[in-house]
Amino acid sequence: RATRAILNHRILYHNPTLRCEQPVIWNYGYRWLDSIEFGKHVHVMPMCEIVVYKHARHSSKEGKLVVGDHSVLGTGVNIRAAGGRIMIGKNSGIGEYSIVLASAHAVYQGALYLSSEWDHSKSDVLIGDNVFIGAGCTLLPGSVVGDNSVVGAGSIVTGNIPANEIWAGAPAKKIRAVPTKEEFDAAARESATTHGG
């Protein structure tokens, strides 16, 4: 408990605009505070677990977490920035109980999976600006979500989602493009007319 309290205090001290609801589990090396960067006015909701290992036993790649200005990590979000980077852009939201993994153990015959080296052929998760990740999503190593995109609740992201698209499913697939303001307004008018306004 004392260690968690100290790690929490250090994060809040070095990020004075960070709004961090308690409890949040912080797990990072005491000397690795430089591997965690929060922009201004980031909001971390309760019961998140944030793990950032700059150096990990099974990886030669540094772990790092960067969260842009005005972004939100919803209740119970699990961030694992070890063996790779997790970069979250500005004004982005990660929905409740989502999981974001920067790296995973290599899987091959004869390997002891929990003690094998980490697979660097797929690592890092990059989330652009103004992205919304729905509740209960999993973003696997190597995932990229472009600016202004949306990932539907419960989705599993394994690859590259271009900017301005809506994806959903397991694995996530493109549903449609994000509508323009004009398209959105036209659809709203049509719906009001159809349903009696």
Image (spheres, grey):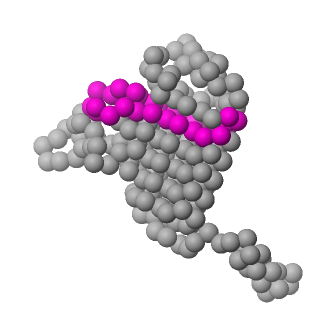
- Residue at the image position 52 percent from the left and 29 percent from the top: 36
| Residue at point 47%, 48% (across, down) | 126
* Residue name at image x 68 percent, y 34 percent: 40
Of 139 and 15, the residue lying toward us = 15
In the picture, residue 42 is in which quadrant?
A: top right
In x, y percent, where is residue 63? Answer: 40, 33
Vertical order, 2 against 179 (above or below): above
Please state the horizontal and vertical placement of residue 55, each as a whole percent of the image: 35, 26
Q: Which residues are magenta?
A: 40-69
Residue that protrudes farthest toward the left in the picture = 110
Outermost residue, bottom side: 194
| Relative height, residue 32 to residue 195 (above, below) | above
Q: Position of residue 124 (x, y in %)?
A: 40, 44
- Give the quadrant of residue 76: top right
Quarter in which the C terminus is drawn: bottom right
Total marks shown come to 0
Q: Quadrant of the N terminus?
A: top right
Residue 129 visible (yes or no): yes
Is 167 a magenta residue?
no
Q: Residue at x 55, y 31 (%)?
A: 37
Horizontally, residue 182 falls left or right of residue 115, namely: right
Secondary structure mostly taken by the magenta-highlighted segment of the chain? loop
